[in-house]
Amino acid sequence: MYEFIIHLADGTDCRVFYNRFPEWKMTALSRLGKVPCPVCRKDFICKCMDKFSDDFDQQMRDGEWLSKAVESE
Ligand SMILES: [Zn+2]
């Protein structure tokens, strides 16, 4: 399992987990609780970021972060 931290422009950090086999697949996504959620403004764990999981997944692929993670092993 691979863990990545995504930094969003509004200061929100999200942690995503991927499984590599049989193909890269996002298995979990959680917002890190340093700043309130940009969607619901709660400062504890919420599910808002789940709606953006497809966007995050696309960013990870566009930025080739997944393949970079493998190279750095
Ligand atoms: Zn929220």
Image (spheres, rainbow, N blue to C red):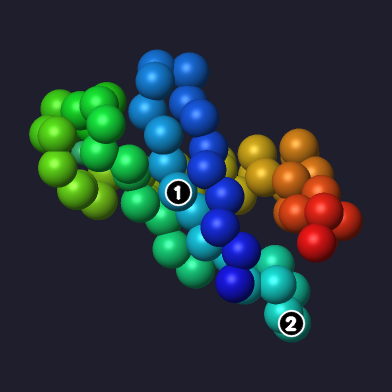
Place of residue 28 in the rendered image (x, y in percent of width and height, measured from the top left): 43, 63
Q: Residue furthest front?
A: 73
Q: Earlier in the sequence, mark 2 or mark 1?
A: 1
Name the residue at 49% across, 68% down.
27
Please name which of the two marks, 2 or 1, marks the residue nearer to the observer. 1
Q: Dot 1 lies on which element?
A: strand
Name the residue at 74% across, 46% down.
65
Q: Are marks 2 and 1 in contact (CB under 8 Å)?
A: no
In the image, taking residue 65 as reference, residue 37 lies left or right, namely left
Q: Looking at the image, is 55 positioned above or below residue 27?
A: above
Ligand 1 occupies quarter: top left
Place of residue 55 in the rendered image (x, y in percent of width and height, measured from the top left): 55, 41
Q: Looking at the image, is 28 positioned above or below residue 31?
A: below
Task: Specify the amino acid type for callout 2.
Answer: Pro
Place of residue 51 in the rendered image (x, y in percent of width and height, measured from the top left): 37, 47
Q: Dot 2 lies on which element?
A: loop
Residue 64: name its quadrant: top right
Foreground residue, 20 or 54?
20
Name the residue at 70% across, 67% down.
24
Q: Looking at the image, is 31 positioned above or below residue 67?
A: above
Residue annotated with mark 1: 15
In the image, taking residue 22 as reference, residue 6 lies left or right, namely left
Q: Report crowding for label 1: few under 14, some 14 to 19, many 20 or more residues within 10 A (C-alpha).
A: some
Residue 2: name its quadrant: bottom right
Place of residue 46 in the rendered image (x, y in percent of width and height, measured from the top left): 20, 48
Q: Residue furthest bottom?
A: 22
Residue behind label 2 places its C-beta within 8 angstroms of ligand 1: no
Residue annotated with mark 2: 22
